[in-house]
Structures are given as structure tokens and as C-alpha cells.
Image (cartoon, rainbow, N blue to C red):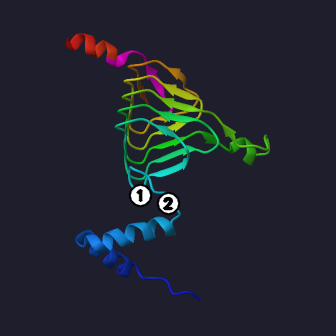
Amino acid sequence: MEKFMKKEEILKIIHLARKDSVVRKSLVPLLCETLDLRENPFHPLVFINGCPCIGKNVYIGIFSEINARKIRVKIGDNCDIASFVSINAADSYKRCIGLSREIERREIVLGNSVFVGSHSFIGGGNRIGHHSVVGAGTILINGGDIPPYSLIIGNPAVVKKGYFKKSLRNKI
């Protein structure tokens, strides 16, 4: 039987990696290989499945997921996706309960300059217009086409159309 490392041993290695760049450079690829993580330009602990189209100057926070397997997911330029966000174009509940043999997949599009707050979920079939904000903790399922400058908040999500466009007019 294989011997497992104790928690204290693992923490010691992590602490050493924080201080020693040589250890860090060898530990991160090993961690990615062990956990079957793909390299990406964001962070080793950003999970990307499939081939999403991700624009320029996009930030994706740690422990976020983008599932674009077998479907189009497009994220525009200058988007900011916080940590612990799930953008998942696949929905398997119908397959699990016997209503379908296939996983349902619907595309997701985020326009340019969209902010997605921490701990949010964006499911398939959503198109979020440019300069929109998805508030922290929002669950967006079947939102359809959301116009630009919208504020999307809550569970279930509520869309306040043109919210930021009005704010910009008042600011000028």
C-alpha cells in the first residue's frame, strides 16, 4: 500500500515553495500534472475545459472554471472574472434523470468589459452584453440575451437593463 504524506509534510513543502523560487518552479508543474491541470495564461488553479475563445486583457481569478467542451464559449476583451466563478456551458441533469442520452450544451458569450463577481455561476444559453456587471453570488441560468450596461444580480438572477448606461449619463 502506498504511503501518503502527512498534512504537516505537505504544508512544509508549500511553505518552502513560497520562499524558494527553484522549489516553486518544480512544484507547480508537478502539481499541474498530478491534478491533471492544463497550463493556461491565468493561473494553474484556473480550470479550463475545451477551447474557449478568450479576448485580450482578460483576468480570471483563482479557482474559477470555464467549461467550453464541445460548445462555443466566448469571453470578450477587458473582462474581469473574479475567483470562484463557474462559466459552464454543459448541463447534464436531463441525462442523469433519464430524459436525454446526451449532455445539453449551449453557448455562452460575454461581451467586452464584462465584470463577473466572485462565487457566480453562468450557465449555457446566456449572452451578456458589453459593459455589464454580474454581481457576486449570482446564479444566471436561462438569462438569454442580456443587453449592454446591465446589472445582473441574485439567485435567481434579476437583470437591471441599462443600469450603468444611466449612471454614466448622470456622471457626465
Give the residue drawn at x 44%, y 44%.
85
Range of residues picked out in magenta:
155-164
Residue receiving disc 2: 37
On-image quarter of the C terminus = top left
Does 146 sit left or right of 113 as displayed? right
The kind of residue tagged 2 is Leu
Picture coordinates of residue 37 (x, y %)? 50, 60
For the residues labelled 1 and 2, say whether their Cβ atoms are less than 8 Å apart.
Answer: yes
In this view, which residue lies farthest toward the left? Answer: 172
Picture coordinates of residue 89 (x, y %)? 59, 39
Q: Label 1, secondary structure: give it.
A: loop
- Is 29 inside the magenta-drawn segment? no
Q: Nearer the viewer, residue 69 or 83?
A: 69
Q: Is residue 40 above or below residue 115?
A: below
The kind of residue tagged 1 is Pro
Q: Is residue 57 above or below residue 11?
A: above
